Image (spheres, rainbow, N blue to C red):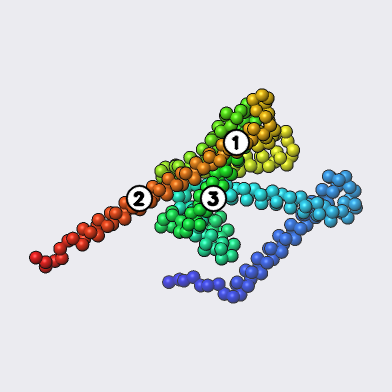
């Protein structure tokens, strides 16, 4: 009968030496290729001679590092935008999300455990489901409703810009008036709020529906940032409605303030949805408590064995 023998210390040392050797070779090859590429880049791109190009390699390294840092910063921005939009989506479709966030804040954030808090927020979908969605403290309940109102304003503004960007991309001019300004925020808030409604009613395809929300935000936010950085001729919705005027119908700024006033109540719709959800959950708890009392009373009324 054969058995697997653990590797000896000599074999382990040989293996580590081989790994270090291959790592050293890879590093040397990488550095050599970088220097050769910079030498060729100076000749091709800057038109230098071979000798000048050789002595200007260090300048090329500086240019290469600065450019790479710019790409890294853009990449970090992309990661942040994607992470936040994906996190928002997970919290919309999870009815226990606010209780989970409360527990994470009290157990880690308030104790200064920043890394653990961020790690668990990034892996929000892997957090265990609490027993109840109700917050434990009054301050937490206020945080829940305040969070939903703030996030609703975020979606209202961003998705309004998305709709405006989509119309501009299709070459459609939106002839806006104060009487019709509420249409844009209504459509904007309907997209995320529909996902929350699906979660309330335990709709089977809520995850599939909500999964395209990060994609929309991710693509449009990047496009808007790129257009703004490049100074394109695109005009943002908030900028457009602030500058647009049409006498004698409305003056400058009228459309902007109409959007803000409409947004006050439209952004509150998801908050009202949370109130209704908690009310229905409260009724379910009351019914369960009543049923438990009936069962206990029935058990108390049953005669014990041996009683006449």
Q: Residue at x 84, y 56 (%)?
A: 58
Q: Residue at x 67, y 39 (%)?
A: 224
Q: Which residue is mark 2?
A: 284
In the image, residue 190 sits, relative to residue 307, either above or below, namely: above
Of residues 224 and 152, the one drawn nearer to the viewer in this rendering: 152
Is residue 103 visible in the rendered image? The answer is yes
Q: Quadrant of residue 169?
A: top right
**Label whose residue precedes the other's in the sequence (1 or 3):** 3
Q: Which residue is mark 3?
A: 147
Q: Residue furthest left?
A: 308
In this image, 169 relative to 94: left or right?
right
Mark 3, Cα crowd under 10 Å, few <14 / some 14-19 / many 20+, is some
Q: Residue 229's spot in the image, x, y percent?
A: 73, 42
Q: What element does badge 2 sit on?
A: helix
Q: Residue at x 41, y 55 (%)?
A: 132
Quick check: marks 3 and 2 in contact, CB under 8 Å? Answer: no
**Label whose residue precedes the other's in the sequence (1 or 2):** 1
Q: Which residue is mark 1?
A: 259
């Amino acid at each position: 009968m054969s058995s697997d023998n653990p590797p000896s210390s000599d074999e382990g040392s040989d293996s580590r030496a081989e790994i270090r050797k291959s790592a050293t070779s890879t590093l040397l090859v990488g550095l050599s290729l970088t220097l050769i590429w910079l030498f060729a880049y100076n000749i091709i791109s800057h038109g230098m001679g071979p000798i000048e190009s050789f002595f200007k390699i260090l300048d090329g390294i500086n240019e290469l590092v600065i450019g790479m840092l710019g790409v890294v910063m853009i990449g970090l921005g992309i990661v942040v935008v994607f992470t936040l939009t994906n996190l928002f989506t997970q919290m919309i479709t999870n009815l226990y999300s606010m209780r989970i966030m409360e527990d994470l804040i009290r157990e880690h954030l308030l104790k200064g455990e920043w890394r653990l808090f961020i790690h668990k927020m990034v892996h929000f979908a892997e957090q265990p489901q609490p027993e109840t969605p109700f917050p434990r403290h009054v301050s937490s309940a206020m945080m829940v409703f305040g969070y939903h109102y703030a996030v609703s304003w975020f979606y209202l503004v961003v998705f309004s810009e998305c709709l405006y960007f989509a119309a501009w991309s299709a070459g459609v001019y939106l002839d806006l008036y104060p009487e019709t300004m509420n249409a844009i925020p209504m459509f904007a808030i309907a997209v995320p709020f529909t996902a929350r409604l699906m979660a309330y009613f335990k709709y089977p395809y809520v995850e599939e529906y909500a999964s395209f929300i990060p994609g929309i935000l991710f693509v449009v936010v990047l496009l808007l940032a790129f257009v703004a950085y490049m100074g394109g001729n695109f005009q943002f919705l908030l900028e457009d409605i602030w500058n647009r005027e049409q006498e004698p119908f409305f003056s400058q700024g009228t459309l902007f303030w109409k959007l803000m006033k409409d947004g006050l109540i439209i952004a509150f719709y998801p908050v009202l949805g949370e109130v209704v959800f908690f009310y229905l959950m409260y009724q379910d708890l009351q019914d369960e408590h009543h049923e438990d009392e009936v069962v206990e009373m029935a058990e108390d009324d049953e005669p014990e064995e041996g009683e006449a």
